[in-house]
Amino acid sequence: MAFIFYDTETTGTDTRFDQILQFAAIKTDENLEEIDRFEIRCRLLPHVIMSPGAMLVTGVSIEQATDPSLPTHYSMVRAIRAKMLEWSPAIFVGYNSLAFDEELLRQAQYQTLHNPYLTQREGNARADAMMLVKTVAQFEPDCLVIPSKANGRPNFKLDQLAPANGFDHSNAHDAMADVEAVIHLCRIIADGASAEWSNFIRFSQKAATEAFLLDGDPVLLSEFYSFGGQKHFPIICVGVDREQSTKHLCFDLSHDPAAFAAMPDHALMACITGKPKPLRKVKINAAPTLRSIDDAPAWSLGGLSEAEILHRAAAVLADTAFVARLLEAYESSKTQYDEPEHVEQMIYGAFASTTDERLMDQFHAVPWPDRHLLLSQFTESRFALLGARIIYAESPDLLPPELQESVRTHVRERLLFEGDCKWGTIAKALAECDEHEPTATPPQAEMLRRYRLLLQALAT
């Protein structure tokens, strides 16, 4: 199966409210030989404020981000989708992509009235090279050189890891350069840790992951955390979340199941949300790090023998009443979240209706002057707002005066908001300019000065 290695450079780090400014991808064959490459940039959306910190990291000035010769955000997303569909099916791979780039790519598609799940449709799969690197560091420590932070912990930042392993990453934080760096690391791993590379490919695919979990044998789950730590759990699958079929529920066999089976229902439910936690959740469509117990080194089994793990797994599966109580406790303890307030937060609401999907397809097909006529036909107001914002970003004059003024008000309220909020605002950006200015190099200080002037002009 082919691979699509990709990376994004963005206006900030919030996966809901920031936007992609640069997207780069390289398609390779199964041997990681390049077949094709694609790169595109776009300009800033009217309602998005660029983080000064992101500007200093990427080197993208405000003049570049607002260059009118660049494609609009909508045009960029359309071009990305066309190329990725042309390249499909493939395994999409990024670096820290499942937590970041994937979410930004989903938002970009959702906010431009496309189905956001491109990396999981059309026969595609997805995986995260950062998780692969962390896995290799644990299970094949001689394969890669892992640099250290000042505190002695391993440093998995791509701009540090790639040079430590022979890649000239002088152009770090350029999307295409980062893609090339990830491919370089994957080639080292494919050659030097072939078993880990095979698992990486295998568990990028939902069906293979589900079959592995449902085989009836205990397996080892490895989880890696943002602060640099990791834990390994021997687990046995006992059920599936009633509302999310991709979320499989597994008993953590590092605990003696007899202790939980003896608990009354209220105590068992308290453990689901507290400690000791009997269940681990495994998303079969999120490339989990798994391996067979008999392929796991003894140090990863938490002091248990393989025989004891097998014994505990058999005891769990045999006690169907306990499993039923465990699953019921899990379902009853789920957190009930408030309805999202902002359109960006509604991405994981209900799937679009057939009517709205049809209207989305029409939106992309009809001439620009006619697109606003479709907005009132959407059954969900979130899609009408997203469509109006798309048209406004292309050319406000394409909207009727009343709707144009409504979107303009929405944009101004976003930019000028001064309370606590998730998105970037003028006030936040000005404060961040003040924060970075004392340590900025002369060129960076000049970038910040020019950005400050633009922000002040926007505020008037």
Image (spheres, helix red, strand yellow):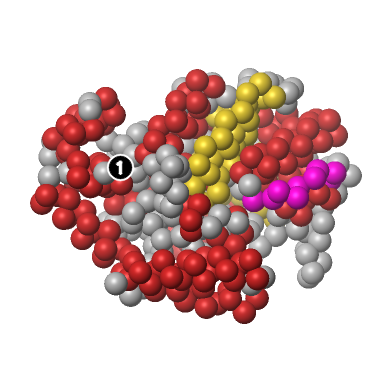
Kind of residue at disc 1? Glu
Q: Name the main secondary structure of what is drawn in magenta.
A: loop
Helix, strand or loop at label 1? It is: helix
* Above/below status of 22 relative to 35: below
* Above/below status of 55 relative to 233: below
Whole-percent x, y for residue 444 in the image: 61, 67
Of residues 189 and 390, the one drawn nearer to the viewer in this rendering: 390
Work out which residue is located at the far right of the displayed protein and give it.
142
Whole-percent x, y for residue 113 in the image: 31, 37
* Above/below status of 65 relative to 220: below
Of residues 203 and 107, the one drawn nearer to the viewer in this rendering: 107
Magenta part of the chain? 165-173
Q: How many marks?
A: 1
Left/right of residue 435 with respect to residue 312 in the rendered view: left
The structure residue drawn at horizontal position 50% and vertical position 20%, both measured from the top left corner, is 86
Whole-percent x, y for residue 331 in the image: 39, 50
Of residues 215 and 283, the one drawn nearer to the viewer in this rendering: 283
Question: Is residue 168 highlighted in magenta?
Answer: yes
The structure residue drawn at horizontal position 11% and vertical position 49%, both measured from the top left corner, is 401
Left/right of residue 266 with respect to residue 357 in the rendered view: right
Looking at the rendered image, the quarter that the N terminus falls into is top right
What is the quadrant of residue 440 in the picture? Answer: bottom right
Residue 39 shows in the view: yes
Residue 295 shows in the view: no
The structure residue drawn at horizontal position 33% and vertical position 75%, both measured from the top left corner, is 419
Left/right of residue 371 with respect to residue 287 in the rendered view: left
Looking at the rendered image, the quarter that the C terminus falls into is bottom left
Q: Which residue is mark 1?
A: 394
Whole-percent x, y for residue 334 in the image: 39, 55
